[in-house]
Image (cartoon, rainbow, N blue to C red):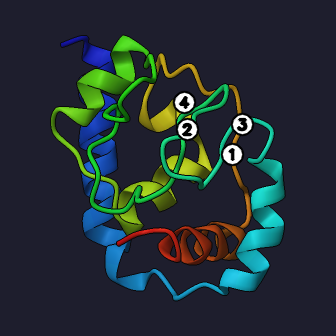
Amino acid sequence: MRVKSALSIITFTAAVALAGPALADGDAAKGEKVFNKCKACHTVEAGKNKVGPNLHNILGRKPGSVEGFRYSKAMEEFGANHTWNDETLHTYLEKPKDLVPGTKMAFVGLNKEDDRDDVIAYLKQFSE
């Protein structure tokens, strides 16, 4: 494992440990509007990938595990030790390349905490 990746994982783990309980419930209706920024590359429709993998049933799923989607090596390595949950999504959506250096996702992130909470609430509607 590269040093930069190891440091990112350590930083992420510390951030989750410190910030995890502070995450607020989001508003799914507002999250649907924020998700418009994601629609060019992602869908919430099961089995349908676009430029990015579908986000249907993302909560509880291992990163880098959607069948039929080709992930970066960085995302596959990250997925070996993580699961998408409120905390991992919140951290990833803030600055994807900070959490997973080498990810193919070009999106710079969502600066507003409320936007991240809202998108996660929206995605929860598509999780079983």
Q: Earlier in the sequence, mark 2 or mark 1?
A: 2
Of residues 21 and 48, the one nearer the viewer is 48
Kindly state the secondary structure of the residue where label 4 is placed. Answer: helix
Name the mark on residue 96.
2
User: Three-letter amino acid code at disc 4?
Assistant: Lys
Where's residue 113, x and y in %?
65, 70
Residue under the image location 27 percent in, 60 percent down: 60
Circles 1 and 3 in contact, beta carbons < 8 Å: yes
Circles 3 and 2 in contact, beta carbons < 8 Å: yes
Where's residue 69, x and y in %?
45, 23
Mark 4 residue crowding within 10 angstroms, few (<14) / some (14–19) / many (20+): some
Kindly state the secondary structure of the residue where label 3 is placed. Answer: loop
Mark 3 residue crowding within 10 angstroms, few (<14) / some (14–19) / many (20+): few
Residue under the image location 52 percent in, 88 percent down: 25
Residue for badge 3:
108
Circles 4 and 2 in contact, beta carbons < 8 Å: yes
Residue for badge 1:
109
Q: Could you give the CA–CA distance between mark 2 and mark 1, rounded to whole angstroms?
A: 6 Å
Q: Could you give the CA–CA distance between mark 4 and mark 3, rounded to whole angstroms?
A: 8 Å
Kindly state the secondary structure of the residue where label 2 is placed. Answer: helix
Mark 1 residue crowding within 10 angstroms, few (<14) / some (14–19) / many (20+): some
Name the mark on residue 97.
4
